[in-house]
Amino acid sequence: MEKIAVIGFENKTEISERYNSKAAVDFDVDCTSRALNFSYSAVFIKSGAEDCVIRAWLTNEHLRIVGDTEALFAEIDFFLGIPEPLEIERKFLVEKPDESKLLEYKFCGCVNIAQAYINKNGERYRVRKRGADGDFIYIKTEKIKITEMKRIEKESRISEAEYLESIKGEKVLYKNRYLIIYGEKCFELDMFPFWSDKALLEIELKSETESFAIPPFLKVLKEVTQDKTYRNSVLSQIYLSLIHISEPTRPY
């Protein structure tokens, strides 16, 4: 059962009753450590929350800012895969920003990611190590393509031992991921050790027509949602074949 945090909503009984068989819901959790942050699969914060509350949860793997109860239910349903577990995202190639200046933006956090794409014993999936400063979670993801923008996605947390066993003999892709909240949307900016001048920006949406505004401090070069060459699985094959990357840019 997924463990989620809901912050800033007064109708706790209604929320609990709606999801009591689908998720473990905690309310108004005070995020006091990165380990506590990572213990939640998703965090939903009501818009208008104090900046310090949003900043405390910035590095959660699924942080969403929501305006009201209807929006909250829509976001939680989508996260839990009700009625089906979809991933809808758009992807942009952007000019690589100055990382130190990027972190000056009040709603920007950074995590380190190492991931590998596994194709063995009739299974195809991704395993990922995600975290920072010694606190990590490990995730197994299976995806089934519907369109270039939409996929069925099934995620589950695994142990460190399962992750290490999975990556034996595999190419591991390292990246720094910046989580940026802008206009109540969460953007993911990935910087790779093999690119010095560009990065990938992603945003997950609830529909293929959902509108959003890209942060003005990021310079978009082009949209690459439909371009298969910018998939992480393809990048790992191209660049890790050309150069030997034995160590990431930051300690993992």
Image (spheres, rainbow, N blue to C red):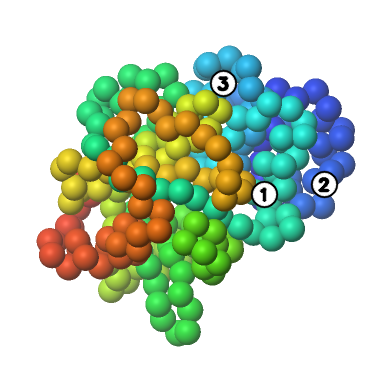
- From the viewer's perspective, is the residue at label 3 or at label 1 nearer? 1
Residue 134 in view, yes or no: no
The residue carrying mark 1 is 78
- Under tag 2, what secondary structure? loop
Q: Label 1, label 2: how many angstroms apart (C-alpha)? A: 16 Å
Q: Label 3, label 1: how many angstroms apart (C-alpha)? A: 23 Å
Which residue reaches farthest bottom? 121
- Quadrant of the image containing the N terminus: bottom right
Q: Are marks 1 and 2 in contact (CB under 8 Å)?
A: no
Q: Earlier in the sequence, mark 2 or mark 3?
A: 2
**Res. 188 image quadrant:** top left
Which residue reaches farthest top? 50
- Under tag 3, what secondary structure? helix
Task: Give the x, y percent position of residue 150.
Answer: 54, 59
For this rendering, which residue is in front, 193 or 128?
193
Task: Give the x, y percent position of residue 53.
Answer: 56, 21
The residue carrying mark 2 is 20
- From the viewer's perspective, is the residue at label 1 or at label 2 nearer? 1
- Which residue is located at x 19 percent, y 61 percent? 239
The amino acid marked with disc number 1 is Phe
**Res. 228 image quadrant:** bottom left
199 in relation to 68, above or below: below
Disc 2 crowd, CA 10 A, few/some/many (<14, 14-19, 20+):
few
Q: Earlier in the sequence, mark 1 or mark 2?
A: 2
The residue carrying mark 3 is 53
The amino acid marked with disc number 2 is Asn
Task: Give the x, y percent position of residue 178.
Answer: 37, 36
The amino acid marked with disc number 3 is Val
Is 10 situated left or right of 136 in this image? Answer: right
Task: Give the x, y percent position of residue 173.
Answer: 29, 58
For this rendering, which residue is in front, 95 or 115?
95
Q: Are marks 3 and 1 in contact (CB under 8 Å)?
A: no
